[in-house]
Amino acid sequence: DGQAPSEVIRGILEHFADAVEQCSMLVRTEERLDRSWNAALEQHGFQPRPQTLLVLSARGGEPEPAQELQVVSARAVVPAYRRFLVEVMSDTGRASQAATQLARAEAGFLDADTLDVLVARHEGQIVGSVGVLTVSEFGILRGLNMAPGAPDSAVSTLLWHLLDLCSRSQLRQLIAAVDDGAERSRAAFERIGMVRVESMETYVAAGFEPLA
């Protein structure tokens, strides 16, 4: 509608200010924004984060079953899921209050009909979680979180259950965006048959405080 890039971004931030703590805008490197958009994003505190886009081509081999691992819906264990997210987010260096706020927001997304989250439990404790957001006939993989020391077999088992969920939902394709350097996540996705299709940049800004 003729708005300047800075005005569009400001409007987005103000609209979602009370919804979540972190905002990201995805930009494919093959179709880079012009300089006015890049400058506007950086003016509002966004920084580029290189990522790799992967899609499911064909399912890989069956994973070795993780011993004593139970996979259930996060909706069945919401309080434990929230506590697990706080621990994971604290391990990434976030302050305690920020980790708690972000975990509460993430757990709140379970109310959405289009989001399904699975958690893996070992001896009653959650050791991993992963979700899929359904958009039409496509699934967007999000939130692969694993407790420190969780074995690769636990990751594979969790992802395999997610593939079964996608199959039952008759999704045509599963898509994942992986940060450059997140080799463990990328390797886990490749073990279930996901392949790289392109590189891209996600502009990320922590916090949703509207700028004056």
Image (cartoon, rainbow, N blue to C red):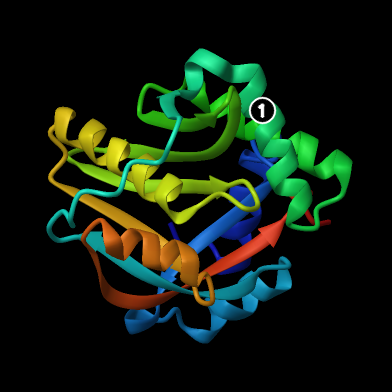
Q: Is residue 155 above or below residue 58?
A: above
Is residue 193 left or right of 20 when viewed as pictured? left
Residue in view at x 43 percent, y 70 percent? 27
Quarter containing the N terminus: bottom left
- Nearer to the camera, 52 or 183: 183
Q: Secondary structure at mark 1?
A: helix
- The residue positioned farthest toward the front in the image shown: 67
Q: Amino acid at mark 1?
A: Arg
Q: Is residue 179 above or below residue 22?
A: below
Q: Quadrant of residue 193?
A: bottom left
Quarter containing the C terminus: bottom right
Residue 104: tell me if it is visible.
Answer: no
Residue in view at x 48 percent, y 31 percent? 119
Q: Position of residue 43 (x, y in %)?
A: 72, 73
Q: Position of residue 91 (x, y in %)?
A: 76, 52
Residue 166: tell me if it is visible.
Answer: yes
Residue in view at x 59 percent, y 22 percent? 124
- The residue positioned farthest toward the top in the image shown: 76
Q: Position of residue 175 (x, y in %)?
A: 29, 55
Task: Kindly identify which residue carries mark 1.
Answer: 82
- Nearer to the camera, 34 or 182: 182
- Nearer to the camera, 127 or 106: 127
Is residue 101 left or right of 51 when viewed as pictured? right
- Nearer to the camera, 175 or 124: 124
Q: Position of residue 5 (x, y in %)?
A: 56, 67
Residue in view at x 62 percent, y 70 percent? 41
- Within 10 angstroms of label 1, few (less than 14), some, or many (20 or more) residues? many
Q: Is residue 115 above or below residue 52?
A: above
Q: Quadrant of residue 32?
A: bottom left
